[in-house]
Image (cartoon, grey):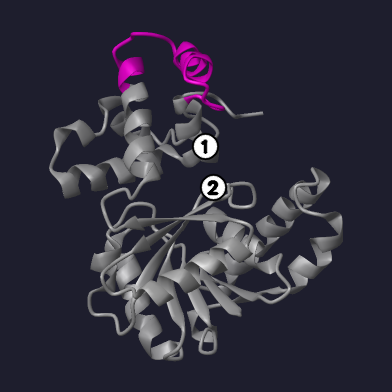
Amino acid sequence: MKIGIIGAGTMGRGIALAFAQKEEHSVILCDIDLDFVNKGLENLKKELERLTSKDIISKDLFEPILSKISAGTKENLSDADLVIEAVQEKMETKKDLFSSLQTICKKEAIFATNTSSLSVSALNEGINRPIIGLHFFNPVPMMKLVELVTTEKHTPEFISQMKELVISLGKTPVITKDQPGFIVNRILIPMINEAIGVLENNTATAEDIDTAMKLGANHPIGPLALGDLIGLDVCLAIMEVLHTETKDDKYKPAGLLLKMCGDGLLGRKTGEGFFSYKR
């Protein structure tokens, strides 16, 4: 298959690596202009060097993987078989993108979104083919799960086809209906938000909160460190979607989460969050 991935950020690059490891796929990594894509490809090469140095990906695959990923923009996707968007987590941005893709891509092309919480049904409105949710998890090369977010537009045969595609990547698919937050983020992000509330109330230090959850609940990483890894802006965006869609105040973002995002303290991506990542 010829795979078009729109969004050369962390998730887009990770998805590109997942497909490019398979002989039968070629990948076009796209963004709003080639400068963004070329920067993304530079970062992808660094990520691949790190993954091969740790034997997460075989060293023998380094050059074959890079040779199968090319740079482009959405206008280069006219013959793509599958197009996955991994752009900014904003409904209008994604809807505008899919609307434009209708006139660029062939009729047989499959459209998919990597949204982590937005309504897939809403994304489908006004689009001439069904969009399915293919929600990969960060870091994509190591995380085995993909949420298949389905709507009434998806036939059992189509869902089965997409399930087999995910399995062929060495991932495990789970099928979820289109509900706010789907499965993982509906459970995970409120837990992180609650941990932030515990810190905000001065119940315990950030270190002790994370230690408690690692040793008391057998979590591999504490909720605050996980929030830093995901990106506190992403956590906030998901909480806001859950709060808006469900109209339930149990999903109201913690005040400290709002403050940290307002101050630009977003976790690993900015070097500072609940913990410091500056060297």
Contact between marks 2 and 1 (CB within 8 A): the answer is yes
Q: Which residue in the structure is indicated by mark 1? A: 229
Residue projecting furthest to the left: 247
Q: Earlier in the sequence, mark 2 or mark 1?
A: 2
Look at the picture and state if 73 lies above or below 54.
below
Q: Please state which of residues 276 and 117 is positioned toward the viewer in this rendering.
A: 117
Look at the picture and state if 81 lies above or below 68.
below
Q: Give the magenta range.
A: 197-222
Residue projecting furthest to the top: 203
Residue 201: say if magenta: yes
Q: Please state which of residues 132 and 262 is positioned toward the viewer in this rendering.
A: 132
Residue projecting furthest to the right: 60
Residue in view at x 44 percent, y 15 percent: 209
> Is residue 73 found left or right of 119 in the rendered image?
right
Q: Which residue in the structure is indicated by mark 2? A: 138
Residue in view at x 49 percent, y 65 percent: 163
Residue in view at x 34 percent, y 8 percent: 203
